[in-house]
Image (spheres, grey):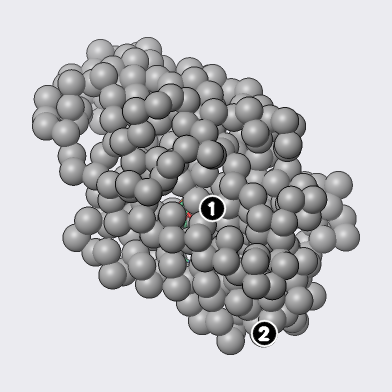
Amino acid sequence: MLSNEHILVTGCAGFIGSHLCEALLSLGASVVGIDNFDPFYGRDQKEKNLAGVAETDSKKRFSFLEMDVCNEDALIEVLKKHNVSGVIHLAAKAGVRPSIPDPGGFIRVNVLGTQSVLSAASKAECKRVVCASSSSVYGNNVKTPFSESDDVHHPISPYAATKLSCELMGDTHHHLTGLPIAMLRFFTVFGPRQRPDLAMSLFLSKVSKGETINRFGDGTTSRDYTFVEDIVDGIIKSYQRIDEHGFRVWNLGGDHPTTLNEMIETIGVVVGREPIINEMGMQPGDVERTWADVSRSQSELGYRASTSIRDGLIKQWAWMQSQGEG
Ligand SMILES: NC(=O)c1ccc[n+]([C@@H]2O[C@H](COP(=O)([O-])OP(=O)(O)OC[C@H]3O[C@@H](n4cnc5c(N)ncnc54)[C@H](O)[C@@H]3O)[C@@H](O)[C@H]2O)c1
C-alpha cells in the first residue's frame, strides 16, 4: 500500500500517466498530476483520460494542474504545497519520427524538462524520483535480448538521444545529491488509451474499417510489446524499491518479441477483418528490433509482464469501440 505517499505524476493526462494515476489512487496514495496538454495529439483525448482518473478517485485524493515541467519554480511550489514525497516523471515529447524534424523541441521538453524535475525534487526535499526512459536508447543493438549493461552509445533518433541524456543527467544528479533516481526503459507500450500515433492504435482503427495500412519495411522488424498494466506495475515496484539502489536503470518489457507481420495478423484476428497492406520502405530512426532482458527487473523488483499481445489487443480494441471506433 502507498497510503502515506503524496506522489507527483508528470504527464498524467497521457496514455501511461492516466493509468498510473488510477493505480496509485487504488493503492491509497494521494496524487498531484500535472500536464501541459502538449498538442502532439488531441487535448480532447487527454481530457477523457483525466475524466477516467477522476471517476476512479472516490476518496478525492487526486488533484490536477495544467503546467509545463520546464517551469522549475512552479514545480517547487507545487511539490512543497502538496508535501510531495516522490515524483514519477512521465511527461515528454514522445515518438521517434516526430523528433527528427524537431530535435530542439525534444531537447527542451525531455532533457531540460527532466533536469527541471530533478532539481525541483531536490530543492523541495522529495525522497525519490522515477523517470520514463525508453527501449529506443538501445538503437540498432544486434545482441538480444537488450540488457541494461549493454553499450547504449549509438541512439539512432533525437528522441532516443534525449532519453539517454536524461539517464545521464539522472545519474549525475544522484551522484551530486544522493537523491534516489530510477530510470525505466519502457518497451513499446500498448493498451486502452494508447497514443493515436502508435502503430497498433492506427492499425486497429484502419483494419476494422477495411482501410489500407502502411507497413514500413518487410514486416520482419520486431518489438517487445508491453501491456500498459504491466508497465504501471513495474513503475510502482520501482518507486517502492529505488531507495535501496540509489540510481538504477531497469528494463520494463514483455520479454516476448513479436514481428510486425505477426502483430498485423493478430490485429486482423482481433477485429475480425483481413488486413490490407501497402508496403513502404523503412522509416529513418526506426530500429530493427527490441527485446527486453528483464532478469534485473525480475530479480530486483519482482517485475514480470503477464498480458499477452493478443489479450492486450482485445482489451485495447474493446476500449476503442467504447470510444466510438468500429
Ligand atoms: N508509449 C510507449 O510505447 C513508450 C515507450 C517508451 C517510453 N515511453 C515514455 O513514457 C512516457 C509516457 O508516454 P506516453 O506514451 O504515455 O505518452 P503521452 O504523450 O500519452 O503522455 C505524455 C504526456 O506528457 C505531457 N507533456 C508533454 N510535454 C509536457 C510538458 N512540457 N509539461 C507537462 N506535460 C507535458 C503530454 O501532454 C502528455 O499528456 C514518455 O516519457 C515516453 O517517452 C513511452
Q: Quadrant of residue 279?
A: top left
Task: Determine the residue positioned at 31% across, 69% down.
Answer: 105
- Residue 108: percent from the left, percent from the top? 38, 72
Q: Earlier in the sequence, mark 1 or mark 2?
A: 2
| Residue labelled with disc 1 | 132
Give the number of the mark in front: 1 or 2: 1
- Residue 70 visible in the shown view: yes
Give the SS element for disc 1.
strand
- Residue 65 visible in the shown view: no
Give the side of residue 259 with respect to residue 90, left or right: left
Label 2 is placed on what type of residue? Glu
Task: Determine the residue positioned at 54% across, 19% down.
Answer: 308
- Residue 156: percent from the left, percent from the top? 28, 47
Give the Cα distance between marks 1 and 2.
23 Å
- Residue 325: percent from the left, percent from the top? 37, 35
Label 1 is placed on what type of residue? Ala
Q: Quadrant of residue 129?
A: bottom right
Give the SS element for disc 2.
helix
Is label 1's Cβ within 8 Å of ligand 1?
yes
- Residue 307: percent from the left, percent from the top? 58, 23
| Residue labelled with disc 2 | 77
Task: Determine the residue positioned at 36% across, 55% down.
Answer: 161
Give the side of residue 171 with respect to residue 245, left or right: left
Local crowd size for mark 1, using a 10 Å CA cut-off: few (<14), some (14–19), many (≥20): some
The correct choice, above or below, for 35 with respect to 301 in the image is: below
Question: For this rendering, which residue is in front, 30 or 295?
Answer: 295
The correct choice, above or below, for 141 with respect to 21 in the image is: above
